[in-house]
Image (cartoon, helix red, strand yellow):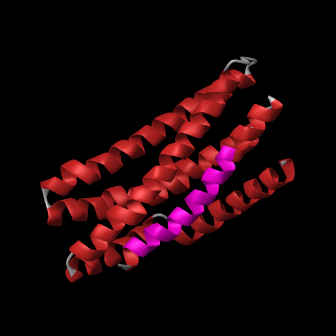
Amino acid sequence: MKAVQTLRDEHKNILRMLKVVKSLAIITFNTKEVYYEGYRNAIDFIRNYADKFHHGKEEDILFKKMSSELGPAIEKGPIFGMLAEHDLGRLFIKTLEDALIKAEKGDEDAKVDIIANATAYTDLLYRHIDKEDNAIFNFADSQLKAETHEELNIEFENAKKGLNSDETERKYVALLEELEAYVASAK
C-alpha cells in the first residue's frame, strides 16, 4: 500500500500543475499573449515528472502487477483505459508544443490550439486522476495480495534510485512553485 500511496502523493503535485496549465490558458485567452517560457516549463514538468517519473511507475510496475495477478478482465478493461488516457495526454502535450512553435513564428491562429490543448489536457487529467485515486488504486489496495504489495514497495524503492527520485522531486516541485507564483501574480 505504500507504493500506491506514493502515486497518490505524486498526484497532488500533478493536480497543482493542472491548475497552473489551466491558468496559463485563461491568461492567453484574456490577454491574447502567450507566456512561452511558462508553457515550456509546464511541458517539461508534464513530460518528466507526470509522465516519465509518475506514469512510468504506474505503467511499468503497478499496472503490470495488477494485470498479472488480477487477470485479463483488469488488464483489458480498466488498465487498458488508463494506458489509453496516458497516450491521449501525451498527444495533447505534443499538439500543445507544436502550437507554441507556430505561435512563436507569428501564427496568431495557433493561440487557439494552445488554449484548446492546454484545456483538453487538464480536463482529461482531472478525470483520469479521479479514476485512479478512487477506483484503480483502491482496487489495488483491496485486491492485491499482501506479498504483492511488498513486491511493489521493493520495486518502487528500486525505481526511486533509477529515477533520481529525491532530485527529480526537488527540481519539479521548485519549478511548480515558480509557475504557481507567476500565475498568482498575473491574475
Magenta stretch, main secondary structure, is: helix
Q: Residue at x 28, y 81 (%)?
A: 150
Which is nearer the eye, 103 or 27?
Answer: 27
Which is nearer the eye, 156 or 140?
Answer: 140
Residue 101 can be seen, yes or no: no
Q: Quadrant of the N terminus?
A: bottom left
Q: Residue at x 76, y 18 (%)?
A: 106
- Residue 26 is situated, as x and y percent measured from the top left of the image, at 73, 39
- Region rendered in magenta: 4-22
- Residue 67 is situated, as x and y percent measured from the top left of the image, at 20, 59
- Residue 142 is situated, as x and y percent measured from the top left of the image, at 26, 75
- Residue 56 is situated, as x and y percent measured from the top left of the image, at 40, 56
Q: Is residue 57 left or right of residue 166?
A: left
Q: Quadrant of residue 84?
A: top left
Q: Quadrant of residue 3?
A: bottom left
Q: Is residue 163 magenta?
A: no
Q: Is residue 72 left or right of residue 178?
A: left
Examine the rendered structure and indicate whether residue 106 appears above or below residue 118: above
Residue 64 can be seen, yes or no: yes
Q: How many marks?
A: 0
Q: Residue at x 80, y 58 (%)?
A: 181
Q: Is residue 6 magenta?
A: yes
Q: Is residue 150 left or right of residue 117?
A: left
Q: Is residue 177 left or right of residue 130?
A: right
Which is nearer the eye, 166 or 102?
Answer: 102
Q: Residue at x 63, y 60 (%)?
A: 172
